Amino acid sequence: MQALDALLNRVSVPRLVDPAPTPEQRELMFAAAMRAPDHGQLRPWRFLTVEGQARQRMGELLAEAAKFNDPLVPDAVVEKALNGPLRAPLVVVVIARLQDHFKIPKSEQLLAAGCAAHGILLAAYALGVGGVWRTGELAYSPHVARGLGLEEGEEVIGFLYLGTPQKEARTAPQEDVGQFVREWTGQ
């Protein structure tokens, strides 16, 4: 697939089934992440792969976090948290590794980590792997961060759900680019 094809046509694919991406596909997806813009070559990201039985444990962790956030949380919210990681055969937890740096602000590092995640999704699309990026308030829970083993200065910025598309992906909408671009003349 040509690079512009992936950039112009990638869409989120939320309905995913087995099989998960192969080791060769994963290698390419993570290699694509490493090409994210990265001022200072800090590599302000890392990734956790969650599959098999670990997805159930991740669901339990998310459900625990939901209860810690609100002891009166509705059962439906707890159930959704429990089952969330089971919606794909592979979940990639995207972690921003924010560092104090004299020249590169943490906001720029966070953007770089987001670009790395996007690189994974673009590569997945190019390889025929379905993927969708999800977060939600539980992604930012200190309980989830501890349970996933995050260190000081690290934060979850997303969960990438990856697998085989259950059905053909929708066609990317054709946007009117002019609605988003304006010339600035300095006046």
Image (cartoon, helix red, strand yellow):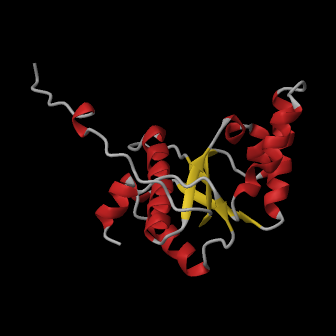
Give the residue furthest to the bottom.
Answer: 24
Write the residue at 68% across / 42% down. Answer: 139
Asked where in the image residue 4 lies, by quadrant, the reply is bottom left
Q: Name the residue nearer the viewer: 4 or 117.
A: 4
Specify the quadrant that holds the C terminus.
top left
Asked where in the image residue 72 lies, by quadrant, the reply is top right
Rendering coords of residue 37 (x, y %): 37, 55
Specify the quadrant that holds the N terminus.
bottom left
Number of numbered discs present? 0
Write the residue at 80% across / 53% down. Answer: 58
Rendering coords of residue 98 (x, y %): 55, 46
Q: Is residue 73 above or below residue 174?
A: above
Write the residue at 90% across / 26% down. Answer: 71
Give the residue furthest to the top.
Answer: 187
Write the residue at 63% across / 42% down. Answer: 135
Q: Name the residue nearer the viewer: 158 or 87.
A: 87
Q: Seen in the image, is 33 located left or right of residue 176? A: right
Q: Is residue 178 above or below residue 6?
A: above
Rendering coords of residue 67 (x, y %): 87, 33
Rendering coords of residue 23 (x, y %): 60, 79
